[in-house]
Image (cartoon, rainbow, N blue to C red):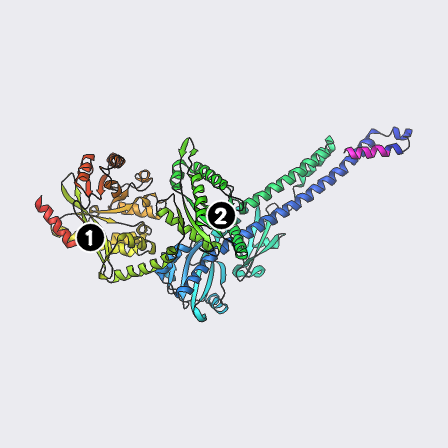
Amino acid sequence: MCCSHCAMDRHQQQVRPFSKRERIRPPIQVGLLAALVVLIPSLLFVLVIVQGEQRDIAAEAEQLMDALATKLEGRLQANLAVGIGFEAQIAVLGDLNQVGLNVLAERLIDPDLNIRHVALAPDLVVQAVYPLPGNEAAIGLDYRTHEKQRKAALQAMETNEMVLAGPLRLVQGGGSHLIARFPVYLAQDEPWGLIALVIRADELFADVGLIDAQSHYQLALRGADGLGESGAVFFGDADLFQQDVKTLNIEVPGGSWQMAIRPINGWNAPLAIYLIYGVIALLFAVLGGAAAYSLRRSVTMRLAHMRHLESLSAIDPLTRITSRYQFERDLAEQVTVCERDGCGFTLLFIDLDHFKEVNDGLGHARGDELLVTMADRMNSCMQRGDLLSRMGSDEFTAVFRGVTSTVEIERRAEELMAAINQPVNIGGLDITITSSIGVAVYPEDGRDGETLIRHADRAKFESKRSGRNTLYFFNASMRNEADLYIELTSAIKAGLQKDEFEVYYQPIYDLRQGAYTRCEALMRWRRGGKDMVSPADFIPVAEQSGLIIELGAWLADEVFNCYQIMQAAGLPMRFSINRSAQEFSSLRHTQHFMNLQEKRDIPTHDITLEITESLLMSDNRTKSDNFQLLKEHGFLFSIDDFGTGYSAINYLRSYPAETLKIDRSFIWELGKSEQADVLVRVIIQLAQALGIAVVAEGVETPQQLELLRDMGCDYIQGFYLAKPMPQSEFKDFIRDAVAAS
């Protein structure tokens, strides 16, 4: 404005003086002229602003579309990588049965992925599916004769390339799905068959942000089966492609998809607001201020929106550190650099111990506050060039660039753990949290990012299993673990067929009645008819492989038979059966258990089902429904190993139990540790207050028995009184005890 005024003054100095006619020009004419002088530049400014705003709208839409496409490609590849893992495993092993599939799937399929199920089809006939429950009908499906799947299956085998089909709807329901078919060839190009990986498309689209973006934009995807522009529309409104839209091609295996985007309110900027700016400029002569404000507003909003888009894909919104998506990209880049330069680095998988309990106890807002603090502390331990990301919930990953020596890794990891271990004041409470860390080193433990993350995660699991608050390096024994699991699961299955399993019964003594009134049924395995295998070795494998369901059904039938034998002998006894959390995962398993009981006509009040605290703390609706069903049917419940969990007391109201068993680790310390004495006394008093009977297991000395009697314990179980014994020996033991009394 100042410069234009100066130019006007110089111009006026060069013209002649006004004539009389000019000096008496009517005020209305002068006013109109002045209005015109102000109005023209005002309208020009408004036009510029409108055009700029329209360019911004288009640019923001394109940026969002590019970010969504990148996330969609990355997320899809992360899911498809699982199929590649299965393909590689089969190529090495030569085959994979249902048991092997269960074990391998537990390792390869991250719960955060969108995989519905995996099917193995040697010779193009489906022989194994994970998870099997709900997909039993797929077993035996012959791709060579199936009308709808034959073409894609044969195409995959003929081209020896993965074929991605869909999205389409399965006969099982559950929304739209993508089906990736991986051809598998063994040595000398011998065809093995197909791997089918089924991905939940609706869930995939939601995870990358397509659903959320629809609050401001119209979005659509077309190109089903990878056919690009000529393919069917499978997300959004098909009519959108006939409108004025921005489009972008998304590369998928074997073809492409096309994304279209359009703002809900169209591409035109709201002209009214800019006309108002022009009117204000005309009335108040503040054109410069209004234009500056409008330009500043437009630029600020654009920059803020760009930062928002960037944070969606690269930054974890809670902790403001790198997101999982961006970390995987950075890690892949780091691998490429080290492949080229021959350098190395260390990847750490960090889990905050017992965060779930803190989060549940204090609330999610306090939990988020704790996560932010932990992220800040870990970030302060990073050096130039290092990476830190939040993988999800309470899990983090870090990369120490250029660090490969064990001494340096331990030094820096301990520094990280020490920072995490410092107390945090949350809501007026001082909380101390520890961490379990798994370590994988490039290139020794893996030559790609996915393998390194998986191996570091496996080492982290060992860290948690060894007591938490520790550092654990990935090692060769872990590589062999999967093979050992497969071998043991095959042996368990063979053992069931060969009757190698036995049931031993350990009497439980009622301190109030002074008699043996209960017993616990314990499974034993004499592998190959020779040495006993410890339950600690085969039960976890049975649970992981799913064979615990078959073992549990066998155990229940044996126990019900023993109950009838004892009743017929005039030796009434209540039986306790250990029941795995997996046996609560399906109504079918529960119904089968109840059918066995009804077939034998066993009174349910004489059967106690022993469950662990972890089942009580599970938020799985199916498990809780099955618990309630068994409860309503009359079965009694006992909480096993009580005191080793973290918050089972909070769940006793929702899952009422008749008894709880104090873990043997507390009993062993009775009379030796004042802390153990106090803990056991408190547990017994708590149970009494809730009307729950207490069983102390692992009693091995008369001193322990007397202490428990003085504390008011109801039942005791342990080697001091009787060891576990086979059925015939158990029957004689109880008969002798009854006679002696």
Q: Residue at x 27, y 44 (%)?
A: 641
Q: Secondary structure at mark 2?
A: strand
Identify the disc placed on residue 96.
none
- 593 to the left or right of 175: left
- Number of numbered labels in the structure image: 2
Mark 2 is on which residue type?
Answer: Phe
Q: Quadrant of the N terminus?
A: top right
Tell me, yes or no, whether the highlighted magenta stretch contains residue 110.
no
Mark 1 is on which residue type?
Answer: Tyr
- 166 to the left or right of 679: right
Q: Quadrant of the C terminus?
A: top left
Q: Which residues are magenta?
A: 1-11
Residue 599, image x and y in percent? 21, 55
- 689 to the left or right of 114: left
Residue 49, image x and y in percent? 69, 41
Q: Earlier in the sequence, mark 1 or mark 2?
A: 2
Quarter of the image holding residue 421?
top left
Identify the disc placed on residue 400.
2
Q: Secondary structure at mark 1?
A: strand
**508 over 442 or under it: above or below:** above
Instruction: Give the CA distance from mark 1 to mark 2.
Output: 52 Å
Identify residue for label 1. 504
Q: Main secondary structure of the magenta part?
A: helix
